[in-house]
């Protein structure tokens, strides 16, 4: 049992969670510090996180920076597009539910891709089939085949970038 607790105890997490607690309380007092330390210890020891699937994962830092810049650019474009769809003097656009493949090999990369896609307006991952590496996505603007194909191409481009940044074949 002691060995299990040693594996669970992560001093950096305890420090980080304690710091977050004190910041959440908006003032440093010894009571806040001790309460934060107790909460952090309880979280680390009694609610352990599963091991991260980082096997065969290496980061191309320049490509990661380019991915982040591109994501912010796409975020700006998608925000303007969704704002226009909401404000334009026309009927709401047709929506669609699509199944698209995600050919990433690592579950952590799949989760990162899901977060990146969900944070942008206009589309949402509604289901992840991990065994078959498929996303089910809800697309806001699916008035025509070109719009649907454009969204499928956007997912494929995100997938290509994630594989290039994180996975080595």
Image: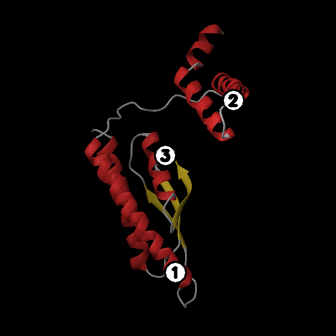
Q: Is residue 77 above or below residue 23?
A: below
Q: Left or right of 84: which side holds 104?
A: left
- The answer to whether mark 3 and mark 1 are in CB contact below 8 A is no
Circle 1 packing at 10 Å, graded few (<14), some (14-19), many (20+), is some
Residue linked to disc 3: 111
Residue shown at the point (43%, 64%) measured from the top left: 75
> Which mark is drawn over residue 85?
1
- The answer to whether mark 2 and mark 1 are in CB contact below 8 A is no
Instruction: Give percent across and percent down for residue 117.
Output: 47, 58
For residue 20, which quarter of the picture?
top right
Residue shown at the point (32%, 35%) measured from the top left: 58
SS type, badge 2: loop
Q: CA distance from mark 3 to mark 1?
A: 28 Å
> Which mark is drawn over residue 120?
none
Q: Left or right of 111: which side holds 36?
A: right
Front residue of this view, candidates 47 and 129: 47
For residue 39, which quarter of the picture?
top right
SS type, badge 3: helix
- Most extreme residue toward the top is 2
Q: CA distance from mark 2 to mark 1?
A: 49 Å
Q: Is residue 107 above or below residue 81?
A: above
Chain-order first, disc 2 or disc 3? 2
Residue shown at the point (40%, 70%) measured from the top left: 77
Residue linked to disc 2: 29
Instruction: Give percent across and percent down for residue 62.
Output: 26, 45
Instruction: Give percent across and percent down for residue 122.
Output: 50, 69
Q: Quadrant of the C terminus?
A: top left
- The answer to whether mark 2 and mark 3 are in CB contact below 8 A is no
In front: label 2 or label 3: 2
In front: label 3 or label 1: 1
């Amino acid at each position: 049992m002691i060995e299990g607790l040693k594996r669970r105890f992560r001093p950096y997490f305890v420090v980080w969670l304690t710091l977050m607690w004190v910041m959440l309380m908006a003032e440093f007092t010894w009571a806040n510090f001790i309460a934060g330390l107790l909460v952090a210890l309880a979280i680390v020891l009694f609610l352990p996180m599963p091991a991260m699937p980082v096997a065969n994962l290496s980061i191309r830092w320049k490509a990661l920076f380019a991915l982040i810049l591109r994501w912010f650019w796409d975020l700006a474009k998608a925000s303007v597009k969704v704002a226009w769809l909401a404000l334009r003097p026309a009927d709401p656009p047709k929506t669609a539910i699509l199944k698209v493949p995600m050919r990433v090999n690592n579950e952590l990369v799949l989760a990162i891709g899901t977060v990146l896609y969900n944070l942008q307006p206009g589309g949402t991952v509604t289901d992840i089939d991990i065994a078959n590496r498929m996303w089910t996505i809800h697309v806001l603007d699916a008035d025509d085949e070109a719009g649907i194909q454009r969204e499928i191409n956007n997912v494929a481009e995100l997938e290509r970038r994630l594989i290039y940044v994180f996975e080595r074949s």
